[in-house]
């Protein structure tokens, strides 16, 4: 049975693939551990939410596609302690700080490994993505299954792109009506 797509804000959203997209994460990490250049496909996971957000669909990737979100949802459904989320996670500065630390460390890592070639670069992307996945799984087990999704740097980026687009659209609408 085919799922219907829905429209949000005049933009068509795809049907959710969250039921099975976790397989993408597992297969990618497994393959990249055996052949490091395959780790470069991790850039697809990083840029897909950005491209979707730029296209005007906001955080559709988070809600309907994200393989990591699907994976931690599956694991968290099996084992979850249901502890209260740390108060730190609620602080306004926490998400930008986490984003800065993760993106900054990723940028430094890329600068250091690019001269070493494709194999090293693929391995660096893999290690970065596996680290984020381990953090996501720990959050999912300790708190709620998709706890990571509330602080995920890619979700934070997508949300900021959505907000920026909305501000631009409002400004352009005001300019046209004035």
Image (spheres, helix red, strand yellow):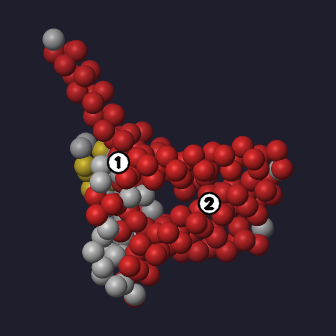
The residue at 72%/71% (across/down) is 33
Quadrant that contains the N terminus: bottom left
Q: What x and y, as percent, mark residue 164?
A: 34, 34
Figure check: 159 above or below 26: above
Q: What x and y, as percent, mark residue 96?
A: 40, 47
Q: Whole-Å distance between the Cαs marked 2 and 1?
A: 23 Å
The residue at 76%/59% (across/down) is 37
For residue 112, side relative to residue 2 (left or right): right
Frontmost of labels 2 and 1 is 1
For residue 20, side relative to residue 116 (left or right): left
Which residue is under mark 1? 93
The image quadrant that residue 167 belongs to is top left
For residue 140, side relative to residue 32 (left or right): left
Closer to us: 162 or 94? 94
Closer to us: 50 or 144? 144
Figure check: 43 above or below 19: above
Q: Are marks 2 and 1 in contact (CB under 8 Å)?
A: no
Counting residues from the start of the chain, the first of labels 2 and 1 encountered is 1
Closer to us: 154 or 60? 154
How dense is the environment of label 1, judged by Cα within 10 Å: few (below 14), some, or many (20 and up)? few
Residue projecting furthest to the right = 116
Closer to us: 90 or 146? 90
Q: Circle 2 — which element?
A: helix
The residue at 28%/64% (across/down) is 87
Residue projecting furthest to the top = 178
The residue at 79%/56% (across/down) is 120
How dense is the environment of label 2, judged by Cα within 10 Å: few (below 14), some, or many (20 and up)? some
Which residue is under mark 2? 128
- State whether residue 43 appears in this view: yes
Quadrant that contains the C terminus: top left
- State whether residue 57 appears in this view: no
């Amino acid at each position: 049975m085919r799922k219907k797509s829905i429209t949000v804000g005049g933009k068509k959203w795809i049907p959710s693939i969250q039921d099975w997209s976790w397989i993408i994460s597992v297969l990618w990490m497994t393959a990249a551990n055996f052949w490091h250049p395959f780790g470069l496909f991790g850039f697809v996971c990083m840029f897909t939410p950005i491209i979707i957000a730029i296209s005007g669909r906001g955080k559709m990737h988070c809600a309907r596609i994200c393989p990591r979100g699907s994976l931690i949802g599956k694991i968290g459904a099996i084992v979850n302690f249901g502890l209260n989320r740390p108060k730190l996670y609620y602080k306004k500065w926490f998400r930008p700080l986490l984003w800065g630390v993760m993106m900054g460390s990723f940028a430094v890592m890329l600068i250091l490994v690019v001269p070493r070639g494709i194999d090293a670069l693929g391995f660096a992307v893999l290690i970065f993505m596996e680290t984020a996945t381990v953090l996501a799984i720990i959050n999912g087990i300790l708190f709620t299954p998709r706890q990571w999704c509330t602080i995920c740097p890619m979700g934070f980026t997508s949300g900021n792109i959505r907000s920026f687009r909305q501000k631009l659209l409002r400004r352009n609408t005001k300019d046209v009506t004035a």
